[in-house]
Image (spheres, rainbow, N blue to C red):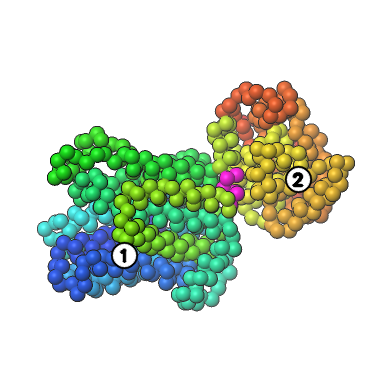
Amino acid sequence: MLITRRFFPYFVTQCLGALNDNIYKNVLLLLVTYSQVNELPISVNMFVNLAAGVFILPFFLFSAHAGMVADNVDKAMLIRRLKLIEFIIMSCAAIAILSQSYLVMLLLLFLMGTQSAYFGPVKYSLLPQTLKENELVTGNAWVEMGTFISILVGTLSAGLIVASDNSLVAASATVVTLAAIGYLSSRAIPALPPQGKIEKIRFTPLSGTWRSIAKVRQTPSIWMAILAISWFWFLGATYLTQFPNFAKLHLHADATVVSLLLALFSIGIAVGSWICERVSYGHVELGVIPFGVLGLTVFGVDLIFAIPPAPVDLSTVYSFSTFIAASQHYRVMTDLFMVGLSGGLFIVPLYAFIQSRAEKGECAQAIAANNIVNAFFMVTAAVLSIVLLGLLEWSIPQLFLLLAALNTVVALYVYSQVPEFAQRFVSYILSHVMYRVNVTGREHIPAQGAGVIVCNHVSYVDALIIMGSSTRPMRFVMDKSISEIPLLKYLFRHAGVIPICSPKQCEKTYEQAFEHIHQALNNEELVCIFPEGRLSADGDIAEFRPGIERILAADPVSVTPMALKGLWGSYFSHKGGHALTTRPKRFWSRVEVNIGETVNGVELGRHGLHQQVSELFERKS
């Protein structure tokens, strides 16, 4: 996938854009800080803070419009135009750098921020259009790795450029050259026409921003994913901003160690993104997010305790070489790397989740809303740091400890609002810790629209295993007694499980189940049923009951057959006694989920569907 034309030119283009942004921004700040200070009409501190605000302001003003534009034009054409604009801006910036016109450079920084605000929505909304579903996480992982490595290289390169003998010429040539190469690479991106109905685009900066946010809030799962991503940027912005003073005051180190801390954090995110791709097994896997949350908290707390005592000689200042040579710093370096790695595990599935759940033709608008909220959280992070460190005189370790504690609070809030996140985690644990689940035919699950999944029923955790095999949420119809198992009741209730029982046991529950199924199918949802009506008593597939025919008579939707293999004999099955009453005998056993092609269930009837599931069950791996 990486070297294909549908991805590689785009990947190179976005990496060069992130690299150029960071080189230009950091060159400007370093030039202002270390040269020609007296020529500024304002103080250096005021200029630095103003520069940070100038770059982020366009994300508030223009992201909503950028999302509308990206959803309603050819994305490849839009990228080429944005890269051409970048080349023009950087050409002007080169002149401003050579003439040392710092206020003009500040204006151009605003224009670069504007260009980035328009590039952000198309950058992520392009992926679900050009990549296959099983490539989406991989694509996001590469984008995050490329972005953070570019940020790191850009930041470090800016320092080297400013420290060189011909700094102004080198800086000017670098930003123009990178912009030119970025434009040339963008020309190789294949056409990507709009996917939805083309709408009239209106430029309404403030009201458009609020409308963009209000729109994504209508889908709670996407809104919570946006809040979670924004929380990570809150954390990241705080860490990155405080690295210089943290290194100086608490690690007694010079500026070269600041670069080391930045490198550890950024490379950690890149490695975490790569690991996320490996453990997601080719599909959007929300189940890995809690591992990222846990890492952000655990290693964030440990970072405080890892700070070594002050050197005996307080005049000692560690350089890069002396810092890494001292063993008492290894724990600090490990913690920072692991915080970054945990962040990579945390954000890659969330970006992929937004892309997979957003309506076609509206993905860029969802990403635009995400960028707006991200920017707000980063500004809030700066304000909080000013208040706590300045007004309340907190120490930086105390601030870091607060972040670690708040991370747990935020995670609990998000998981309480979107139970699907918790369900996916439990499903992931079952699929990759208790069992080795292999899914074949995942592409046969309908990507959109109403549909029925029919599957054999082997154990109490069948629904959780099936849930993990699909990136699309499902409504499960299951025996009322199973849906009320104490340990699983919470998960099943919030998963929208439809309880059912025989009409002899409760006629009302039986009829309500069919009414709820009808409503779900009318809402274009997927409904998974176990037509046997009960757990298998011998491991074989029992006769299908007439209920499936009644469902399809009322709603003749497509049917996807599915078979579970390997759960018979597990702690959750009836082999050797009633499920959950015998001693667990095996872990890490192999489980297969075989998914067949969609069929016409009305024509096949329950006996034909039984044959379809049986063939999948008997299929050799």
User: In the image, is residue 45 above or below residue 583?
Assistant: below
Compared to residue 11, the image places residue 110 above or below, namely below
Q: Are marks 2 and 1 in contact (CB under 8 Å)?
A: no
Q: List x then y, in percent, for residue 111.
A: 33, 71
Tell me the element at label 2.
strand
Residue 264, how many percent across, how many down? 31, 44
Q: Residue at x 22, y 57 (%)?
A: 158
Q: Is residue 423 found left or right of 504 in the rendered image?
A: left
Distance from the alpha carbon under mark 2 to that under mark 1: 54 Å
* SS category of the residue bearing label 1: helix
Query: Which residue is depicted at the point 83% across and 47% down?
Result: 510
Of the numbered discs in the image, which one, if any, rests on residue 52?
1
Amino acid bearing label 1: Ala
Q: Is residue 406 magenta?
A: no
Q: Quadrant of residue 301?
A: top left
Where is residue 467 shown, x and y percent of the image?
Answer: 63, 43
Q: On residue 499, which mark appears?
A: 2
- Left or right: residue 241 compared with residue 493: left
The mark nearer the N terminus, 2 or 1, is 1
Quarter-wise, where is residue 308 in the image?
Answer: top left
Observer able to see residue 423: yes
- Quadrant including the C terminus: top right
In the picture, residue 178 is in which quadrant? bottom left
Vertical side of 144 occupied by 181: above or below: below
Residue 339 picture location, percent across and down? 38, 44
Image: magenta residue range:
418-423
Q: 50 or 559, which lies in front?
A: 50
User: What residue is drawn where x is 13% and y is 60%?
Assistant: 166
10 Å crowding of disc 1: few (<14), some (14-19), many (20+): some
